[in-house]
Amino acid sequence: MSNEVQEKRIAIFGSTGSIGKQALEVIAANPDKFSVEVLTAHQNDALLIEQAMKFNPNIVVIGDDNKYNTVKNALSGTDIKVFAGEKSLEEVASMDCYDFMLAAIVGYAGLKPTLNAIENGKTVGLANKETLVVAGDIVMRKAVENRVPVIPVDSEHSAIFQCLVGETRNRIEKIILTASGGPFIGRKPNYLVNVKREHALQHPNWTMGAKITIDSATLMNKGLEMIEAKWLFNLQPEQVQVVIHPQSIIHSMVQFEDGSIKAQMGLPDMKLPIQYAMAFPKRIKNDFPRMDFKKINNLTFEEPDVKTFRNLSLATDALFKGGNLPCIMNAANEIAVYAFLRNRINFLDMTDVIEKTMDAVTFIEKPSLQEYFDSDGEARNFAADLIKL
Ligand code: NAD
Ligand code: MG
């Protein structure tokens, strides 16, 4: 008998995105450890077809119904099953053909498939932070009920998760989430008001999907991550701290009750947290570039400028107030980011849209899942009306 890990059957929800593509690179480098069972895409039929031809999954799902025939025809010479539409994503998430879901859809759209995976006992590698921002209490409760591990893929949360291995009996005093500060670090509102989408899409340290890149430029990404961390690690809001660390070498830290701080470090490369989540509890060998301390002579830290990057204070309010407020904030943010990406509003307008929506939509302290869905819809409509979409 070999002592290698048994081949894990992987479903990548959002395989055509930045995380999804990097996950496929990890799988291609480790064919003895992982097999691809499910691939899903929203619009990009050409890439989904190419990935399916290469990895020969059991099932592919194309979100956009209009593209069903193109995908079906292209894969007609194979025995790959093809589904289309939002409902199919949820149904496939409940199927038996896989063990591990990589939740790599962007935004609220990732919530329902991930909930179904958890309810069906699948291990989840969670890139889709919005799932926990929208309904973290319900998602984590269901994970506990179904004894399902939720393993973070977000680099900061993967860092914290790695720092906590072997520390189950030890209490966390606080966690320190590091933030690069994005492309506009040090800038003030008079500059930000004129920032264009092309400029905001240039992140200094990471290449990512468009939505998270804008969230990183506004610091909303760090706000979403504070809420994500609260649910993943069962923390009180005051235990979550953010520090700007422009070099993105320390991916985050945990401070324990004795004052000792553990950090996880490395070059910024999402393939590492993706691989760690898929292979957990093992670490597997790879040939990713290594960090060289002789070349890194300056690791710096500073306070975030929450007066300029007000999204971070809105997210802190949502973190402390809880209930459906993070869900409302997330919905308004999704609408605002897509409006900015379509040049409909300016950079600073995004924050105004989010703030007004958070003030307007009815607060619910202990929402049911249905109430989260309704709050999301209400917040989207309100934000879209503000922007006149
Ligand atoms: P992306 O935009 O590059 O890819 C998104 C994927 O989701 C694509 O496969 C797309 O087809 C699919 N998708 C989009 N809208 C959909 C919808 N309505 N229904 C079904 N599928 C849909 O995004 P990304 O950068 O890969 O990020 C994915 C998630 O991972 C996000 O939640 C993001 O916050 C998180 N994340 C990303 C990174 C990164 O480096 N890219 C790092 C940490 C966390
Ligand atoms: Mg992150």
Image (tube, rainbow, N blue to C red):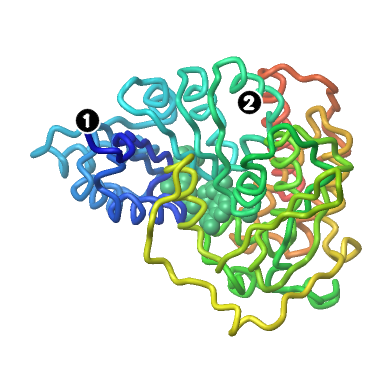
Q: Position of residue 205 (x, y in %)?
A: 59, 71
Classify residue 84 as left or right of residue 301: left
Q: Does dot 2 land on a helix, a strand or a loop?
A: helix
Disc sitting over residue 172 in the figure: none
Image-based side of 363 in relation to 273, left or right? right
The answer as to whether callout 1 falls within 8 Å of ligand 1 is no
Neighbours of disc 2 within 10 Å: few (<14), some (14-19), many (20+)? many
Q: Residue at x 60, y 56 (%)?
A: 212
- Camera sees residue 389: no
Front-most of residues 375 and 319: 319
Q: Residue 372: name its quadrant.
A: top right
Q: Nearer the viewer, mark 2 or mark 1?
A: 2
Front one among 59 and 189: 59
Q: As drawn, is 44 to the left or to the right of 385?
A: left
Name the amino acid type tagged 2.
Val
Residue 204 position, x and y percent, is 61, 74
In what quadrant does ligand 2 lie? bottom right
Residue drawn at the location 30% of the way across and 47% of the way down: 48
Write the residue at 78% across / 59% down. 349
As drawn, 59 above or below 292? above
Q: Which residue is mark 2?
A: 139
Which residue lies most toward the left here? 77
Residue at x 88%, y 61% (from the top left corner): 306
The residue labelled by disc 1 is: 81
Placement of 166 over or under 276, stated as above or below? above
Is residue 274 visible in the rendered image? The answer is: yes
Q: Earlier in the sequence, mark 2 or mark 1?
A: 1
Q: Mark 1: which secondary structure?
A: strand
Disc 1 marks which amino acid? Lys
Q: Quadrant of the N terminus?
A: top left
Residue 170, percent from left and from top: 76, 36
Along the line of sight, the residue nearer the viewer: 203 or 2: 2
